[in-house]
């Protein structure tokens, strides 16, 4: 937790909330490629079609348990189920005990969040500069309890005073209740907060309806919202944002530098 600093108003705002996936972090590569390397370390080299089936089997195993992933322990159980599903798909002829042994060796693949996700290149300097300008920062994301682990592994957790994650809280965006929860924990009103996200329906609409300043960020290759809303969109401007992609560092133009 960062030490409290005097807030520098951003049009009267004190808190900037960020969505996580598609806003701060992205997938490093296709899941199949992560699986391929991990399986190769176990001496397993499934053909592409079987590998894709394994990816689907792991996803299905996860979604069956996703609602229970409110703690890291529960996330670990889901990862075990995912590993079992993968090995049952790529090595169905192995004896059950051998598959279980392989699955235990495969489980760490699911536990290393840095193997799956990375921060966008522009995120760290923007967080550093916004923090230096006295703004409090937070995360508001539809994710399971592993989001906290991800922030730690990427060394991003040090920037955030407030982290509200949907699965542990039992409510997810676009439900306004999760936005209110984040505001309550930060001790600020809606008129003092900003929401930055890439998904129009989940991030932008509910934030605007509650009175937050909503910044719609569209990452290249990830539209994340209405087809007519690329780039950056804020209240008071055109409803459809300009063509192209505006980097997250556009936020810096909204946050006056007290040293300037």
Image (spheres, rainbow, N blue to C red):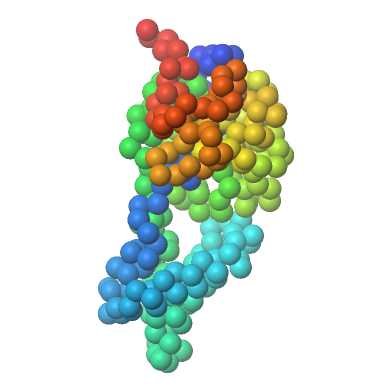
Residue 87: image x %, image y %?
Answer: 42, 79
- Res 2 visible: no
Vertical arrangement, residue 120 with respect to residue 82, above or below: above
Q: Please indicate whether residue 195 sits to the left or right of residue 93 in the image.
A: right
| Residue found at x 55% / y 70% | 61
**Residue 186 in picture, x, y percent from top left:** 62, 29
> Which x, y percent locates residue 45?
29, 78
In the displayed structure, 37 sits above or below 246; it is below
Relative placement, left or right, of 48 versus 58 is: left
Q: Quadrant of the C terminus?
A: top left
Nearest the eye: 165 or 225: 225
Answer yes or no: is residue 46 visible: yes
Look at 39% across and 23% down and name the residue there.
Answer: 129
Residue 178: quarter of image = top right
- Asked whether 110 or 37 is in front, the reply is 37
Figure check: 146 above or below 2:
below
**Which quadrant of the structure image shows residue 120?**
top left
Q: Is residue 117 above or below residue 249?
A: below
Q: Most extreme residue toward the top, as rendered?
A: 260
Residue 65 % position (x, y):
60, 66
Q: Residue at x 62, y 48 (%)?
A: 166
Number of numbered markers: 0
**Residue drawn where x is 50% and y is 21% of the image:** 135
């Amino acid at each position: 937790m960062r030490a409290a600093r005097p807030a520098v108003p951003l049009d009267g705002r004190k808190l900037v909330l960020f969505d996580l996936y598609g806003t701060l972090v992205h997938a490093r590569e296709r899941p199949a490629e992560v699986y391929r390397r991990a399986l190769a370390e176990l001496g397993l080299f499934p053909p592409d079609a079987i590998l894709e089936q394994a990816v689907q089997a792991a996803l299905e195993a996860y979604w069956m348990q996703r609602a229970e992933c409110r703690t890291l322990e529960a996330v670990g159980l889901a990862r075990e189920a995912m590993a079992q599903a993968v090995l049952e798909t790529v090595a169905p002829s192995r004896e059950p005990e051998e598959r279980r042994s392989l699955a235990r060796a495969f489980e760490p693949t699911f536990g290393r969040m840095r193997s799956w996700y990375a921060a966008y290149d522009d995120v760290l300097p923007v967080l550093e500069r916004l923090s230096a300008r006295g703004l409090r920062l937070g995360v508001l994301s539809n994710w399971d309890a592993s989001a906290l682990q991800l922030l730690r592994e990427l060394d991003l957790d040090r920037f955030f005073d407030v982290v509200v994650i949907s699965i542990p809280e039992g409510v997810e965006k676009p439900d306004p209740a999760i936005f209110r929860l984040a505001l309550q924990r930060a001790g600020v009103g809606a008129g003092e907060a900003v929401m930055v996200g890439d998904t129009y329906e989940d991030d932008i609409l509910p934030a605007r309806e509650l009175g937050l300043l909503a910044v719609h960020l569209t990452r290249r290759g990830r539209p994340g919202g209405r087809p007519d809303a690329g780039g950056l969109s804020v209240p008071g401007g055109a409803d459809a944002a300009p063509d192209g992609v505006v980097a997250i560092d556009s936020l810096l133009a909204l946050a006056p530098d007290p040293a300037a």
